[in-house]
Image (spheres, rainbow, N blue to C red):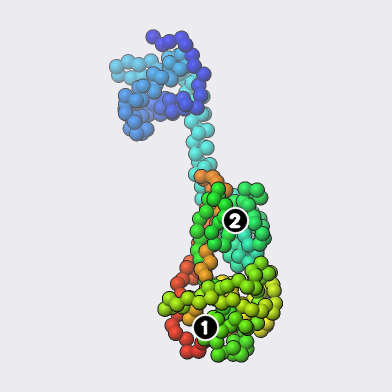
């Protein structure tokens, strides 16, 4: 005989309701157990626990069959609605798992944002019409939590250990100049020979800063420019100044890839490479980033792979010390 004590149902009773609905649908404890991937004994235990929690009998059982009681029929109708609602929640979560929605909010340094982030976001917006985006490009410190951003791109090691950091790829710094300026300094065969050349620099980098270079043989050398002809605080401005012949510059290789391919500027001293620039994406501390963030990071990794950011320096010995490499 069932106990008369009744318990308010809660979410912890949902598995019991699922079992009850499955038994009614299959008309068999054995079939229901197989479909639920549990034992027949556990099916019986679930039905017994549900009846005890409700304080009513749901099924009249005989040795050959079980039939719904009148109250069991009413409970079944309500239980099916609950199970259906749970299935709908699961369906929604599954359908949204790979479909980005909402607003993708990304922060990045100005030049990196223009070079990588904007093209990647543009491709995602074309592929997923429901996605919207907001780019916050600044060379200052941008905190993803404070500014409510999905991700912030940083160059080299992230300074905030409370954030989740993922490495996207890397590039190397190289020396570039216009063809005319390169010819004027063609006697230079090592980075230190360019110390007194005219330079274009970013104002955030002190003129006395030393650039470390290494060659294919492992030799290392420091270059400390002694004069800056022009200071410019954006990558586009530095590129234009180099193309115009205003001076030499140390820049990430991919920032000037198109200019090198077209011959608007040359890679100077191609036997030598500067520091490796590593790009990270910093995320707020959460375990399940939304689909838009996962797809954005995947798209950025494609950009790094396609553009050759990860390629190691393996250029052949040039025929001229200032010759641009392929």
Of the two numbered discs 1 and 2 on the same chain, state the one appearing first in sequence. 2
Residue position marked by numbered label 1 in the rendering: 190
Residue 40 visible in rendering: yes
Question: In this orientation, which residue lies closer to the viewer: 314 or 90?
Answer: 314
Residue, x 56% and y 73% (percent of image)? 211
- The percent position of residue 101, horizontal first and vertical second, equals 59, 49
- The percent position of residue 71, horizontal first and vertical second, equals 47, 16
Label 2 environment density (alpha carbons within 10 Å; few <14, some 14–19, many ≥20): many
Label 1 environment density (alpha carbons within 10 Å; few <14, some 14–19, many ≥20): some
What secondary structure is found at the residue carrying circle 2? strand
Residue, x 56% and y 84% (percent of image)? 193
Q: CA distance from mark 1 to mark 2?
A: 37 Å
Where 25 falls versus 61 (above or below)? below
- The percent position of residue 200, horizontal first and vertical second, equals 66, 77
Question: In this orientation, which residue lies closer to the viewer: 177 or 2?
Answer: 177
- The percent position of residue 13, horizontal first and vertical second, equals 46, 25
Residue position marked by numbered label 2 in the rendering: 152
């Amino acid at each position: 005989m069932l106990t008369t004590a009744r318990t308010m149902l809660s979410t912890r009773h949902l598995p019991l309701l699922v079992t009850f609905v499955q038994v009614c649908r299959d008309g068999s404890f054995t079939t229901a157990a197989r479909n639920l991937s549990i034992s027949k004994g556990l099916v019986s235990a679930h039905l017994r626990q549900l009846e005890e929690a409700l304080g009513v009998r749901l099924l009249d059982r005989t040795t050959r069959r079980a039939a719904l009681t009148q109250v069991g029929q009413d409970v079944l109708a309500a239980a099916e609605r609950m199970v259906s609602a749970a299935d709908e929640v699961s369906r929604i979560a599954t359908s949204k798992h790979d479909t980005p929605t909402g607003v993708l909010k990304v922060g990045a340094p100005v030049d990196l944002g223009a070079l990588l982030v904007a093209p990647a976001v543009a491709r995602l917006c074309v592929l997923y019409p429901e996605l919207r985006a907001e780019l916050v490009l600044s060379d200052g410190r941008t905190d993803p939590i404070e500014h409510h951003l999905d991700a912030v791109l940083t160059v080299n090691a992230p300074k905030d250990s409370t954030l989740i950091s993922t490495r996207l790829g890397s590039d190397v710094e190289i020396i570039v100049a216009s063809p005319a300026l390169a010819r004027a300094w063609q006697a230079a065969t090592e980075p230190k020979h360019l110390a007194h050349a005219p330079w274009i620099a970013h104002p955030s980098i002190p003129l006395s800063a030393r650039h470390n270079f290494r060659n294919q043989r492992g030799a290392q050398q420091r270059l400390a420019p002694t004069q800056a002809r022009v200071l410019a605080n954006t990558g586009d401005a530095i590129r234009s100044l180099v193309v115009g012949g205003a001076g030499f510059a140390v820049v990430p290789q991919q920032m000037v890839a198109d200019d090198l391919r077209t011959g608007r500027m040359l890679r100077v001293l191609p036997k030598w490479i500067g520091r490796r620039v590593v790009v990270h994406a910093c995320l707020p501390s959460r375990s399940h980033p939304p689909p838009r963030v996962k797809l954005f990071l995947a798209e950025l990794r494609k950009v790094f792979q396609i553009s050759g950011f990860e390629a190691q320096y393996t250029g052949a010995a040039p025929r001229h010390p200032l010759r641009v490499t392929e």
